[in-house]
Structure formats: C-alpha cells, structure tokens
Image: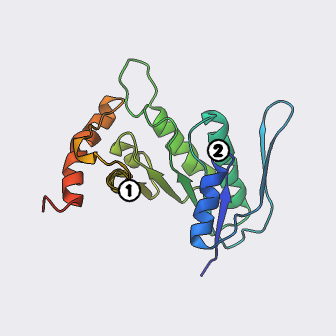
Amino acid sequence: MPNIKIFSGSSHPDLSQKIADRLGLELGKVVTKKFSNQETCVEIGESVRGEDVYIVQSGCGEINDNLMELLIMINACKIASASRVTAVIPCFPYARQDKKDKSRAPISAKLVANMLSVAGADHIITMDLHASQIQGFFDIPVDNLYAEPAVLKWIKENINEWKNCTIVSPDAGGAKRCAFFPFLFCKTLGLVH
C-alpha cells in the first residue's frame, strides 16, 4: 500500500500545514520560484515514487500563477512516478465560467478541468463548486465537499442571536444554496426529519 505525501502550493501554506498536522504527517519538501521572465519553477524535494500524493493549492489570490504552479506540481509528481496524484483545490479556479452565456464566450471551468487531467491529476477534491455541473467536465473522480454543515455548527456555537440571522448570497449561484440553508439549519437542530 502506498504511503501518503502531502505537498503545499504557495496559495495557502497555513491550510496545508493544518491538514498535515490533522493527519499526523509532515508536509513534503517543495521549492517554488520564479525565473526572471516570471515563469514558474517547481522542484519536488523528495522521492514520490509509488506514493499517493496530495497537492493542496487553492484557486484564489494570484489565480493564474497558482493554477500554473498546481499544474506543474501535478506533472512533476506524475513524471517522478507517483502512484496517484490528488489535487486538493478548496476554491476551484474559473468556476464561475461554467457555461456559455454569450456568443463566443469560453467555458473556462471546462478548460481548467482539461488542464488538470492532462497534467496528470488522478482525483480532484474541491469545495462548494459554483455549479455542480463542473464535476461533469472531468473524466476523473471529483469530490465536491460542502461547507454548510461546518458553517452551521460555527454559527450555532458563535452567534448568540443565530435564530434571528439572515443568510445572503453574493450571486444567483449561491442563492440556491442560501435557499436550502434554512432547511439544513433546521435539520441540524432536529426540527425537520
């Protein structure tokens, strides 16, 4: 059975460290740098041969740089003979561009899915996709985790007047989740079966 190795991209090293700590593992050694022409360079600092590799890199902040860094890290692990490479992407890049809503508009979320597959990812773990249809853009397994249960727990434990709170959404995609949120809230409290 292969061992698990976790590597962190530069988008969110604190999150990667918390995941590794929770699992009782050390983060893998990786060096990322930029060449003078701003190309991204990634060096995996340890053997991954036959290992089950998890790369944690979010699609936030410097989205294009973080995405390219993730693709290079996946490919570096794959050509170094990793048994399996899982990309852990808490915020999926270009997720809002998930459909053709105008003439000549690209479906950029599909492009990102293709790039991750071509780079060598065997599995994707992400959270709260803008639209569930993005999972269908992949030919590899995708786990779309939901934050609602953890958010509900946090609200209940940290907001005194939680019964009088209002949940809002920044856009129409999130409005569907907000509409379902009160049901989940009541279910969590045991008010709905």
Image-based side of 115 in relation to 169, left or right: right
Q: Secondary structure at mark 1?
A: helix
Which numbered disc flags the more N-terminal residue, 2 or 1? 2
Quarter containing the C terminus: bottom left
Q: Position of residue 128 (x, y in %)?
A: 40, 47
Image-based side of 159 in relation to 181, left or right: right
Disc 1: CA contacts within 10 A as few (<14), some (14-19) or many (>=20):
few
Q: As drawn, which residue projects farthest toward the right? A: 36
Query: Eyeballing the image, is 52 above or below 165?
Result: below
Q: What's the CA distance linking mark 2 and mark 1?
A: 22 Å
Q: Position of residue 40 (x, y in %)?
A: 76, 40
Q: Is there any visible trace of residue 118 in the rendered image?
A: yes
Q: 183 and 1: which one is in front?
A: 183
Q: Secondary structure at mark 2?
A: loop
What residue is pinned by disc 2? 11
- Quarter of the figure with residue 53: bottom right
Q: Amino acid at mark 2?
A: Ser
Q: Amino acid at mark 1?
A: Ala
Disc 2: CA contacts within 10 A as few (<14), some (14-19) or many (>=20):
many
Q: Residue at x 28, y 42 (%)?
A: 177
Q: Position of residue 147 (x, y in %)?
A: 39, 52
What residue is pinned by disc 1? 150
Q: Residue at x 60, y 61 (%)?
A: 18
Q: Residue at x 28, y 35 (%)?
A: 175
Q: 128 and 76: which one is in front?
A: 128
Q: As drawn, which residue projects farthest toward the top? A: 103
Q: Is there any visible trace of residue 84 in the rendered image?
A: no
